[in-house]
Image (cartoon, grey):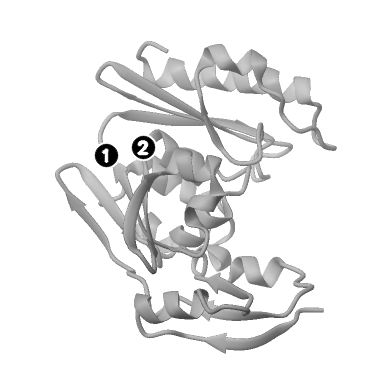
């Protein structure tokens, strides 16, 4: 049974942070609310809705695209400023009913291990602006995924990605429409090629091809750990063949 005891819709970020950092109050921050709908909450929490507190804008400057935390995934798909690969990967986050509610900030915060969009953000050198009572700071997405305490008692404000380069993705699932068992995403720029994988760790991760044999993916009913390692290597090879570059 859900135990939501109060609902807040702060008018700005400062109000949201004050609510989030109240002593003795357990709070849950939501953007589109899609994670909240799927969760079974066993403790008493107050919900802080960021719809009026965070940006819904996408902007481009000097080859970098900044996406406000409250940008819906469908709006991301429809915005021509967003790198093409990220628009394609956003389509794979779920049906349009979800995409019209889920936000980029919520997607990053959830960091689902099978999120191809988060993997795409990684290869696009994403940085995440997070705000706390002590001000706003920017952290690389890779660091944020590895250390979730960096966002503790803070709110994701925006995600900024690098444009340019040649990017591609490859995946294997039980059906073409199914969530991927493993997906590989890659992006090649001058002198540099980045790869990210889903389905091999607790969150999507950046890897090099040489690191793949040492991965210890979780096993489930869709495949063993060894099977996922083989998929990871095969899919990275397919992405590399498509984008070129030296791994």
The quadrant of the image that shows the C terminus is: top left
Total residue callouts: 2
Q: Are marks 1 and 2 in contact (CB under 8 Å)?
A: yes
| Mark 2 burial class by Cα count in 10 Å: few <14, some 14-19, many 20+ | many
Q: Is residue 80 visible?
A: no
Question: Real-space Cα distance between discs 1 and 2?
Answer: 7 Å
> Mark 1 = which residue?
163
Secondary structure under the numbered disc 1 in the rendered image: loop
Q: Is residue 148 visible?
A: yes
Position of 185 with respect to 76 (left or right) is right
In this rendering, is residue 232 above or below 144? above
Locate residue 55: give its quadrant.
bottom left
Locate residue 42: give its quadrant.
bottom right
Secondary structure under the numbered disc 2 in the rendered image: loop
> Mark 2 = which residue?
124
- The picture places residue 63, in percent across and down from the top left corner, at 19, 42
Closest to the observer, 240 or 37: 37
Residue occupying the point 54% across, 11% down: 210
């Amino acid at each position: 049974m859900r135990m939501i005891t109060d609902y807040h819709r702060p008018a700005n970020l400062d109000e949201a942070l004050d609510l989030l950092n109240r002593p003795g109050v357990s709070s849950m921050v939501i953007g589109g609310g899609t994670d909240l709908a799927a969760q079974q909450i066993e403790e008493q929490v107050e919900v802080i809705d960021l719809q009026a507190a965070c940006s819904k804008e996408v902007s481009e400057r000097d080859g970098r695209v900044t996406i406000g935390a409250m940008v819906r995934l469908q709006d991301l798909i429809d915005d021509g400023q967003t790198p093409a690969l990220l628009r394609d990967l956003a389509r794979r986050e779920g049906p349009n009913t979800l995409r019209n509610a889920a936000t980029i900030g919520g997607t990053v915060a959830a960091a689902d291990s099978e999120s191809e969009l988060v993997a795409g953000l990684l290869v696009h050198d994403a940085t995440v602006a997070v705000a706390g009572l002590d001000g706003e700071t920017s952290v690389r997405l890779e660091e944020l995924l590895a250390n979730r305490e960096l966002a503790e008692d803070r709110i994701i404000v925006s995600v900024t990605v690098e444009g340019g380069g040649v990017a591609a993705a490859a995946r294997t699932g039980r059906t073409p429409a199914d969530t991927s068992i493993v997906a590989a995403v890659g992006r090649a720029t001058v002198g540099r090629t980045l790869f990210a994988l889903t389905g091999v760790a607790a969150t999507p991760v950046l890897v090099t091809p040489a690191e793949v044999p040492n991965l210890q993916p979780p096993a489930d009913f869709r495949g063993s750990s060894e099977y996922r390692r083989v998929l990871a290597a095969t899919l990275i090879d397919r992405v590399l063949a498509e984008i070129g570059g030296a791994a």
